Structures are given as C-alpha cells and as structure tokens.
Amino acid sequence: MAHHLFGTVLTPHGIASNNRGESAGNVTTLQKVIKDDGLFTTVSAEAIRYAIREAFTEGGKVVNRRITSGGSDWRDPKFENWQAHLDDDLLGFMLPDKETVKRRGRLEISRALSTRPWPGDVVFNAAAVGAQSSGNPKRSSGNPNPMPYGTEIHATRYQYSFALTPETLEDRTRAIDALESIRDLRRVAGNHSRYLYDFSPDAVVLRWTHDPAPRLMYCFEQDELGTITADSLLSRVGSGDIDASEVVVGGPAALALRDRLTAAGIHFAEGVKDAFQEIEARLRRHLGL
C-alpha cells in the first residue's frame, strides 16, 4: 500500500503585495476570492511552483527549466530525458506538439489563501523623476514627470497545502528534495522588485499516511486578534478521521496550541525545521535510506 505525504504551511505575518502585473487604472491589484462572506487575497499555486523551481536552481539541483534573474532556459526542451531532471519528475510538464508529451505533476500544491479578509488597504506612491525609461535612447533622462501609482496591500499570513506520493516518482528520494524546498521557501509571486514577502513556514502540519486523502487542507484559522487555532485538525483527529500518530505539527506560530495538540496525541516540534526533520526521518525509513 502506498504512503502519502500531506502538509499545510502557515507563513509568517507580513505585508503582501503579491500581484501579477494586473491593474485597475494605475492601481496594481491583488488576486482575491470570496470565502465565508469575506474577500480574501490569494496567491496562485503556479507562483509557488515557480518559486520551488527557483529554489532548485539556486540549490544546484539538476533541473530542466533553470530559473535565473534573466528568466529561464531549458536543458531538454523536448523532455526526451525527463527522468534525469528533478523538476520534470516532481512538477510535471507538457509539450503541446503533434504528439503531446506530458507528465502530471506529482507534487500537488493548492492556492495560498490569506488567513484574514482583505480590509481594502491601498498605498499610493510616485516614481521618482527619471525612474521610468522613456524607451527612447535619445532621452536618457527617462520620464521627466513623477509617475503616480497605487498598490493594493494586505497585512496577513497565508496558508497553502501540498500532497505527494513518493512511489509515483521516477526517483523516490526526490520526495526529500520536495520537503526541503517547501521548508526553505523564500519568495513567491510578483512585484518583488519593490516588496519581499516571506513564504517560509511559521507553522506547519505534516502527515505521513496510507490514507489517500489529506484531510488537513487550510486547517489553520486566525481571529481578529491574530490568535492562531487549528480546530478543524483537532476535530478530525478527535473523530478518528486522522490518526494522531501520523501527524507532526511545529513552528513558533503554533506554540500556543502545543498543549491541546499533545493531549490529542499529536507529535509537536517547537521549530518548523524540527517538524520537517521528523517527517523526513519517517520518509527515509520508508525508503530504506
């Protein structure tokens, strides 16, 4: 029977401006969804996947699509040797040619969702004189006027979930690379020439199980005072839907939950790195490493 790896990541609190270059007039906008009658901001799974590719490149991993400051390039654009590349194995690919060549991504990632509704915050700025290129080489001074613009921002945490079945990988040890990339994820999504938002985990729920369903997606809640809870996770454990022995929770943002989690039989680690290390140890035992 296959083993499955599931997780939900809660980011630190920060001021996000993870827009995609979309705008309404001269205001760059955040992506939003309606949830529980509120307007929540969101970051796409593709943006997180891109950041993972970037982390693989910076970590010196053997990848097909290498992400650099100048864009990306391909070692094997026709995927003739995809098995040799970490990103093709984990994240999948598609070549829309006469005979479509494709592989479903084995590392599945959900959209990141803000833990609190967006209150409508917008900041207004003006680019300095000459900051915008005129596009005319004869006018090297650039645009002679300040350029006003607005940016939607959201002071919030985000959470997202992931799933992976190591047995479906060409090289099962690449599941460890996937875990490490999520553990150490740094920057995600757009507008980072101006803004940096930390997407590394501040709290994490990890599950190593035979159960094919995650049952822990978006399991963190945050009230208006900033208090973090995980009532849906505890309810699932209490009902028997999730075996407590399969779960590891860790990170500073979850410290207030330690007593309730340990009373439920859940392994608690104070740091996110310790939580990932515990799950990685279970994975390594399974792989015989």
Image (tube, helix red, strand yellow):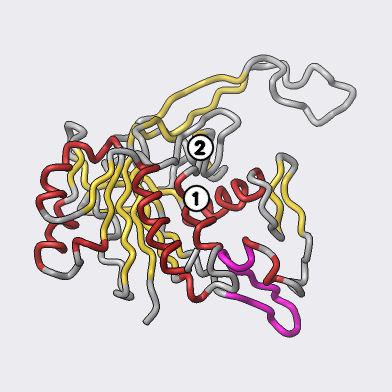
Q: Residue visible at 56% across and 36% down?
A: 191
Work out whether residue 39 or residue 289 is closer to the camera in this orientation and state it.
Answer: 289
Q: Residue visible at 31% across and 40% down?
A: 251
Q: Residue visible at 56% across and 48% down?
A: 51
Mark 1 is on which residue type? Glu
Work out whether residue 100 or residue 247 is closer to the camera in this orientation and state it.
Answer: 247
Q: Residue visible at 69% across and 58% down?
A: 63
CA–CA distance in space, label 1 to label 2: 33 Å
Q: How many marks?
A: 2
Q: Is residue 111 above or below residue 24?
A: below
Badge 2 is on which residue? 28
Residue 99, position in %: x, y? 73, 85
Q: Quadrant of residue 139?
A: top right
Q: Residue 34, which numbered label?
A: none
Badge 1 is on which residue? 180
Residue 203, position in %: x, y? 31, 43
Q: Is residue 182 above or below residue 187?
A: below
Q: Is the residue marked by circle 2 packed among few (<14), some (14-19), or many (20+) residues within 10 Å?
A: many
